[in-house]
Amino acid sequence: MTERHNTVTFKGQPLTLEGKPLETGQPVPDFNVLKTDLEPLTRQDLLGKTTILLSVPSLDTSVCSTETKRFNELAAKLENVQVVTVSMDLPFAQKRWCQAEAADNILPASDHRDASFGKNFGVLVRELRLLARAVWVIDPAGVVRYRQIVPEMTDEPDYDAAIGAAKKQA
């Protein structure tokens, strides 16, 4: 497994990311995560629509919650764009979070079972077994058109850049 050091930090402490980084221009790799109804979500589910794909450490943290709520609000204003948030949280916890926050414009998905998303997208944090904070914009054909891996996991992503990239693809 490919390891990358010093790509991200958590509160200033360097961490190790496992997996090969997914770059712009590359097709989305295979992955298998669970939706809140325990049904699988795979690469095939991203095809045919522009997707803003988020990875966050945990919806139960303030920054992840803020980020996901913000993308939920922004998604309501976009046409033909879906927002998927992947974390290591259990599907039940994700469902509770969405209900509590009235987040009905995003699709949460859990990578807790085998971390296939984290490994295949290169954002699995070895030391924490969480996902690094990242944003990808995927075009309807399944090709990455924008990518940001946030260097400090406690920082928010560049919302404007992600939304701008999604609008170009929609």
Image (spheres, helix red, strand yellow):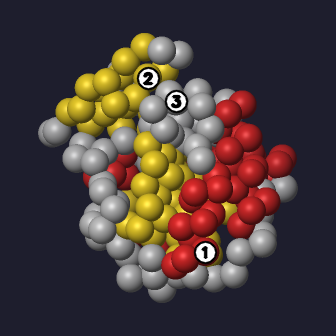
The residue wearing badge 3 is 153
**Tag 2 or tag 3, which sits nearer the N-term?**
2
Asked which secondary structure carries label 2, the reply is strand
Is residue 76 shown left or right of residue 68?
right
Compute the Cα span from label 3 to label 2.
6 Å
Q: Nearer the viewer, mark 1 or mark 3?
A: 1
Nearer to me, 106 or 42 = 106
Question: What amino acid is labelled 1 in the image?
Answer: Lys
State the image quarter where residue 125 is shown.
top left
Image quadrant assignment for residue 85? bottom right
Q: Left or right: where does residue 98 sit relative to residue 170?
A: right
Label 1, secondary structure: give it: helix
Which of the numbered marks, if any, corresponds to residue 2? Answer: none
**Residue at 48%, 38% in the rendered image:** 150
Q: CA distance from mark 1 to mark 2?
A: 30 Å
Above or below, comparing residue 95 to residue 27 in the picture: above
Identify the image quadrant of the C terminus: bottom right
Tell me the mark number nearer the camera, choosing from 1 and 2. 1
Report how far apart the C-alphas of labels 1 and 3 lie in the structure: 26 Å
Q: Residue at x 44, y 61 (%)?
A: 146
Question: Going 72% across and 31% down the picture, which residue do you hit?
Answer: 62
Type of amino acid at the residue the image marks with label 2: Thr
Residue marked by disc 2: 9
The residue where tag 1 is placed is 167
Q: Is residue 35 visible?
A: no
**Label 3 with label 2: CB-CB less than 8 Å:** yes
